[in-house]
Image (tube, rainbow, N blue to C red):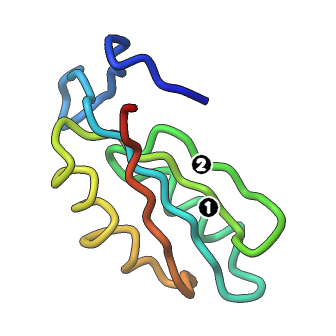
Amino acid sequence: MKRDPYQKCFLWYMGYIIMADELVYVLVRTNPGMLEDVVDRIKHLEGVSEISPVTGAYDIIVKIEGVKITTALGVVVKRLRKIEGIQSTETLISVNI
């Protein structure tokens, strides 16, 4: 799906509604039996706009939006990866072409 570069995403961040310019998808593998707990913890992280449990090589796809790419990636590195029950992650940065 091609993202319109002129279409802006809005998100709630630290009590304010802001425009999100950067989009990151994170593929998450969880430890066996931890899927529901991990989903519950991820959905409360600031910047997470969507979370979808899936089948296949990964267990969850997380969509993270941020004003800057460093903000979006900070959610992954500083918060998401520290959640108990996450085995591994793969981060995909959305690009406009």
Using the image, tell me which numbered label, if any, was put on residue 39. Answer: 1
Q: Is residue 45 above or below residue 10?
A: below
Question: Quick one: which residue is furthest to the right in this view?
Answer: 55
The image quarter containing residue 34 is: bottom right
In which quadrant is the N terminus drawn?
top right
Residue that label 2 marks: 51
Q: Position of residue 88 (x, y in %)?
A: 52, 83
The image quarter containing residue 13 is: top left
Disc 2 versus disc 1: distance between alpha carbons? 7 Å
Using the image, tell me which numbered label, if any, was put on residue 74. Answer: none
Q: Position of residue 19 (x, y in %)?
A: 23, 21
| Dot placed on the residue nearer the N-terminal end, 2 or 1 | 1
Q: Nearer the viewer, residue 67 or 33?
A: 67
Amino acid type, residue under disc 1 in the picture? Val
Q: Position of residue 31 (x, y in %)?
A: 67, 88
Q: Left or right of 55: which side holds 15?
A: left
Badges 2 and 1: C-beta atoms under 8 Å apart?
Answer: yes
Q: Left or right of 31: which side holds 64?
A: left
Classed neighbour count for the residue bearing mark 1: other residues with Cα under 10 Å, few (<14), some (14–19), many (≥20): many
x 39%, y 32%: residue: 97
Q: Say what secondary structure mark 1 lies in.
A: helix
